[in-house]
Image (spheres, rainbow, N blue to C red):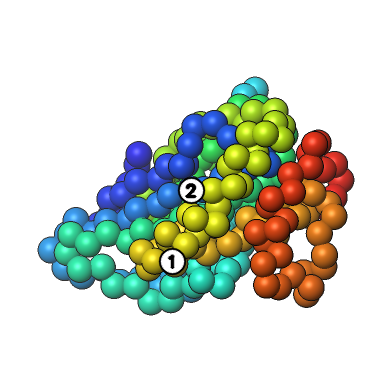
Amino acid sequence: MRTRGPVTGTLRFDAEKYVLGAPMLLEIEVRNPGPEPLGFDDRGARVVWIVRDETGKTLCDVGGHESRLGSEFVGKVTLAPGETFHETRFVNRSCEGFTKPGRYQVSVLRYVSDARPVGMARVCEDLVPAPSDPQASDVDCAKELPRYPAIAADLSLEILPFDPRALHERTGRLSAERKAAWDAHDLSREGALSAYPDWFCEHVRCSCPPLWERNGEWAVKTLENTPTTMGQGCR
């Protein structure tokens, strides 16, 4: 774990191995160890990714331009001295590489600021490895992003081959996990879990109704029906 500025924290996946098609969650904690309150604006994306395969090839180089969804919306945050900010990110959709079995190295940066930085089109920060094409780095981002407090980590994970039985067992726990997160007022985790059924429909099953027709108990019913093979070319 690496840090910059008046923050400490942790970045970790909720598992080291995932069966292909299962929800992948990144858990983030940002702590204020200082004697003064720490304020930041979290209405925009504040996570930067580089995903590599086991040969070191860069598969994804994402510079914090994804949107926040529904109950993941936070807005202005103020951490008192010693207070911790918790959030959970649904990451399956962050990189198409995650739709194939294999071992992956993921460099993640979570920064905090009270202003919207300029640029952010690519990873261009000193806490994570340089992008595969340094000449393409965004100049404005390179100037702006190093000013902000941040935590970063290099993480590893393995995606196992598609296994309908194991996937069905995992999705069977999802509704209870969502309810537990809601009851605990952990809206970030509840939002991340709520994002999974749409991804499941579009990348695993390939046979779900259009987004505007998904209502009621469709998610529970959809997750109960695991296909025998991982969908190919759904999108």
Q: Amino acid at mark 1?
A: Trp
> In the rendered view, does 65 fall on the left or right side of 185?
right
> In the rendered view, does 16 fall on the left or right side of 200?
left
Residue 76 visible in the shown view? yes
Above or below: residue 3 compared with residue 34: above
Q: Are marks 1 and 2 in contact (CB under 8 Å)?
A: no
Question: Which residue is rendered at x = 35% and y = 39% of the image?
Answer: 1
Question: Which residue is rendered at x = 65% and y = 23% of the image?
Answer: 55
Q: Quadrant of residue 220?
A: bottom right
> In the rendered view, does 199 fall on the left or right side of 33?
right
Sequence-wise, which precedes: disc 1 or disc 2? 2
Question: Which residue is rendered at x = 37% and y = 49% of the image?
Answer: 151
Residue 12, given in percent of the width and then of the height, sits at 42, 42
For disc 2, the neighbor class at 10 Å (few under 14, some 14 to 19, many from 20) is some
Residue nearest the observer in this picture, 198 or 62: 198
- Looking at this view, name the residue that lies furthest to the left: 35
Residue 114 visible in the shown view? no
* Numbered disc total: 2
The Cα atoms of the two marked residues, 1 and 2, are separated by 18 Å
The residue under label 1 is: 182
Above or below: residue 37 compared with residue 15: below
Residue 26's label in the rendered image is 2
